[in-house]
Amino acid sequence: MLVIKNLSKSYGEKKAVDGVSLQIKAGEICAFIGHNGAGKTTTLKACCGILGFEEGEILVDGISVKENPLECKKRIAYIPDNPDLYGFMTGIQYLNFVADIYEVPAEVRASRIKKYADALELTFALAQNISTYSHGMKQKIAVISALIHEPKLVIMDEPFVGLDPKAAHTFKELMREICQNGGAIFFSTHVLDVAEKLCDKVVIIKDGKLIKAGTMDEVKGDTSLEKVFLELVD
Amino acid sequence: MIKALLKKQWLEYSSFFTQGKDGKPRKRSALIGFAVLILYGLGAMGASFYLMAQGLCEPLVMADMAWLYFSLMAVYAAAFGIMIVAFSTKVKLYEAKDNDLLFSMPIPAHIVLFTRILGLYLFTLLIECMVLVPAMVEYFLVAGFSVWSVIGCLGVLAVAPLFALGIGALLGLGLAWITARLPFKNLFTLLSVALFAVGYTYLTTNFSENLGTIILQADGVGGVMNTALYPFAKLGYAAEGDMLALALSVLIFGGAFALIYLLLSKTYFKIATMKRGERKAKYKEKTARIATPMQAFFKKELFQLIKNPMYLLNASMGTILALVGAVAVLVTGGFFGLDENLLAMMPDMQKSMGLLVCVMVCFMASSNTMAAASVSLEGEKIWIPQSLPIGEWAVLKAKLFLHFIMTAIPTLVLAVCLGISFDLHIAWIGAGALTAILASALFASMDLAINLKFPSLRWTNEMAAYKQSASIVIAMFGGWGIALLPVGLYFLFGKYLPAWAFACICLGLIVVAVIALFVWLKQRGTKIFRGLSV
């Protein structure tokens, strides 16, 4: 579903991502971990076509992000680390806006909005302005808007920040459901316990370079992901 | 503590000049260019006030009533200052984003208020200087210098802003108090700002139109000033060099402001931290109206405009004035005195009122600035259009279209009303209508191009994007310059060309400019938009 080949991205003199290659197949949940400033957000943004890159190639469902970004974006959903949303819209207006962009038919979007808003307990607030939402509510609306077109690949930057325990639990179930339906998920996180329990794959990045990647069992072996991560980055 | 807060305030204000779009320091050349632009803007405003002062100064000085001249200019400066300061006061005192942060620190609320008020005083001083400094320059040219009059004028410059700031702060306090309790605070703010705008336009239009009457009835006006507007009469005497009047002015204006400050100080923390009343609307499921991706983005732009009263009023001044003007022109036969001012500047235009209509329509079209703020307003939400499967050109087209629609319709109405009122030939009414459409397309694309070149995505308050950014300054003053360019060209070449030929050439040039801007936006603008990041 997602293939990254030799990705490099610089900000002036500084190389933020240096020759990263990885692959995520349909049905897989992959955690992307690394210290602050390691290059996680840069990589995720490059995968979504938000950020250009100098070297390498990114393929989403076999389509090049560089050559055909719009086709890739149709297959992707992206949730940034701190989703700033249009505060002047109500929740439902924002969801309809996103659904219009993805050209989701009226009946389909209505049932999906109901399903996800009920699951994340946000239905009561859909008629209110997003500017009145708490951080967690904004995160929930970002999650619903990401799932509204049933993306094949969901890319998320720290998606659990701000979610209450129940919403986080529901969201993990939704993530599994996406993968069972043939989708793939690639997300960054600092919560290693969640990554360990939820993910099939893990990728560790340090100073822009990929230092370890593989299935969860391959990477952590008999020990914990936290221990492996600390040993690798120290 | 005060020093640290003042330093923060200074950094906040100075970053507007010293920091570029990426938050990095501007290059020296960019800094000089920006300073020149600001000076041009201030100079253009100052020049218009200077023209007004010119009409009043000499007759009143000759009649030995220079004090009345200064008093009238001080009243005008106060009205101008209040109009601008009142809503800034509400935002900067009560809705500042760092209020919570500062209140969480061991800083007394009155200290926070003091540093913010000091910043607002300097802002008001700058606003009033645009009116009073040209008035003083004209006085010195007509009446000559004296040490006492220079001291008096400097004293008046320092004291006069206290009135506008005091009234503005009181209005800001009232607005903050009311909007904190109202469920429809946007509507209330919109209505109050519109009421202010209409009141200010009425006052200034009457003032400009009645300069002759004021001069003829100077004794009567002076009598009113000496009684009903006594503090302003004292300011007038002070500017003439009367030190006793200056001392009295300091006492009156300073004392009144101290009382207002005391009231603000007592209520500041409570109102600044008051939870704003929001109606908790209940969600009812209903079938959504499907829109195309382009329509969805247009709707988003429209929501953004109409749901923010301050943005609406700042960016749509041309729309409001064109619609109000269209009604006014049918009722009074004049257009806020703009027609008279243009004719005074360019008497040759009397021969072709059709051309004058085209210039006025173009001027109104140049007063809208929504496209010049539309990219900056994306701010940290820029990830949304960038991550969605919609081309950059479609996003830019939605921004262009909103600006075009909001400008073309009212200016078209204005062109027709002006044509009917001035009893123009149908061909000139058509030319006016065509000007409305082409000028709207020109300024929409020009403003968007300017905002793409000078985007400001790192703001803490949206107001910075639609009121205080470099692109707004360039778009507004550049737009006015372009709109009035035909007046200058007609002055140079009007003798050699019939008016209709001159109009055709101008419209042809606008068409060429629109095409060039569209090509630039589609090819280069889309790339810039794609590369924007916070």
Image: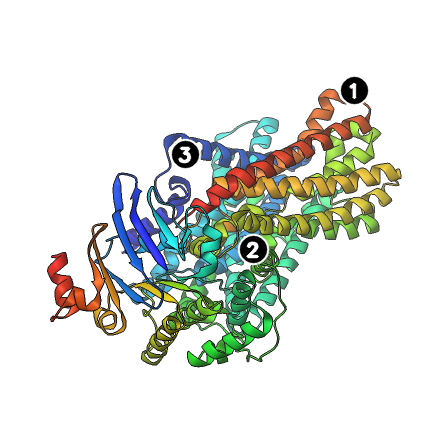
Q: Name the subunit of mark 2.
A: B
Can residue B280 be spotted in the picture? Answer: yes
Q: Residue at x 55, y 79 (%)?
A: B283
Q: Position of residue B400 (x, y in %)?
A: 61, 47
Which circle's residue, 3 or 1, is located before the other in the chain? 3
Between the C-alphas of marks 2 and 3, the distance is: 27 Å
Can residue B347 be spotted in the picture? Answer: no
SS at circle 2: helix
Tell me the kind of residue under disc 1: Lys
Locate residue B54 relative to residue A42 in the image: left or right.
right
SS at circle 3: helix
Q: Which residue is mark 1?
A: B495
User: Residue A127, relative to residue B193: is it above or below?
Assistant: below
Q: Name the subunit of mark 1.
A: B
Tell me the kind of residue under disc 3: Leu
Q: How many marks?
A: 3
SS at circle 1: loop
Which circle's residue, 2 or 3, is located before the other in the chain? 3
User: Residue B339, relative to residue B195: is it above or below?
Assistant: above
Whether callout 2 and callout 1 share a subunit is answered: yes
Q: Which residue is mark 2?
A: B311
Q: Residue at x 41, y 46 (%)?
A: A66
Q: Residue at x 54, y 75 (%)?
A: A127
Whether callout 3 and callout 1 share a subunit is answered: yes
Q: Which residue is mark 3?
A: B31
Q: Residue at x 45, y 69 (%)?
A: A147
